[in-house]
Amino acid sequence: MRSFLRSVPGLLHLKRFLWYYFTFLKNIIRISWCSHDGKLFVSHSNGSLMVLPYRSIWQAEARQLNIMNNGYLQHLGSKYTTNGFKIEHDDIVIDCGAFVGGFSIAAARLYGAETVIAVEPTPLSRQCLYINSAIHNVADKIQVVPVGLGAKAGNFELNISRSGCDNSFLTPDAGATGEKIMVSVVTFEQLVSQLGINKNANILLKVEAEGLEPEVIKGIAARKPQKIVIDITPERDGISPVNKLIPMLDKLGYTLVGQNDRCLFAVFKK
């Protein structure tokens, strides 16, 4: 029994490796690509087109190629919406953890949001985001803000991962490179104030912060978004933050309108 238990972590790593390996192979036959200036331009046979932060296809993150297979914008749009929780034309969408812009672009292009604030602290991801928003003809609707969101303001170390999408102020849940960069962090309250967003505006806040989601919610004070969707996948030491988030949202005056294995959906009680 002890021998078996010692082997469990290795089996889990093997399972993860095999999933990534076969996912990569499954999707690579459906795409064409070219690399330029440290970025990967990927075109899928289903029409999905995105620029990703990889130097070559062999460094590409298997999950990102899998999202391409599902339709990049369609996948991100469906992940962060549900019955009773939609993106409206007049919503100001604040995309915390925008990465290369998949959800930001989906909000503007597929759901018609006129104003999207893409919050992304990683320079290479922002470069891809700018290109992707131009490719999809929504650059005029997306404002890119080069900060992170958190519980308090300051300069903090961001840990870089090989995947790019796992960069985190915590230890990355996969592929940590050991590289760190200093980035500016503000609270949600400070962000809204600095951007001069009208106090009567309807704000939809999407949070995907690689395990730091509770700290982002702590940064909400007097100014509250009308709608919040939060990624709750287990990225904080392998544990989901959902049990911390639900009482926090309730204390702030939010009602849950949906929950699945990936996201919480909440609206502010007026």
Image (spheres, rainbow, N blue to C red):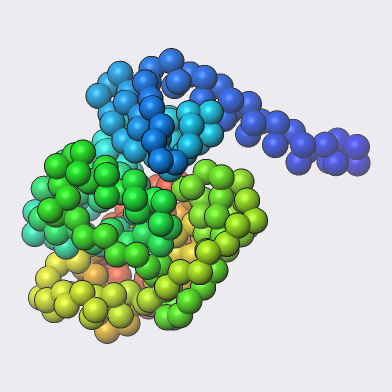
Decide which of 44, 240 is in the foreground and name it: 44
Q: Is residue 186 above or below residue 178?
A: below
Residue 74 in view (yes/no): yes
Q: Position of residue 103 (x, y in %)?
A: 28, 47
Dividing the image into 4 quarters, which one contains the N terminus?
top right
| Residue in the image at 38% along x and 76% along y | 186
Decide which of 104, 252 is in the foreground and name it: 104
Q: Quadrant of residue 88?
A: bottom left
**Residue sitting at the far front:** 37
Dividing the image into 4 quarters, which one contains the C terminus?
bottom left
Q: Quadrant of residue 51?
A: top left
Left/right placement of residue 163 relative to residue 136 reads: right
Q: Position of residue 77 (x, y in %)?
A: 26, 43
Residue 82 in view (yes/no): no
Number of numbered discs: 0
| Residue in the image at 34% along x and 65% along y | 146
Left/right placement of residue 19 relative to residue 208 reads: right
**Residue sitting at the far bottom:** 222
Decide which of 226, 118 is in the foreground and name it: 118
Q: Is residue 46 above or below residue 244?
A: above
Q: Is residue 220 above or below residue 2?
A: below
Left/right placement of residue 97 relative to residue 198 reads: right
Decide which of 184, 244 is in the foreground and name it: 184
| Residue in the image at 62% along x and 51% along y | 176
Q: Position of residue 223 (x, y in %)?
A: 24, 80
**Residue sitting at the far top:** 29
Q: Position of residue 7 (x, y in %)?
A: 82, 36
| Residue in the image at 58% along x and 25% along y | 21
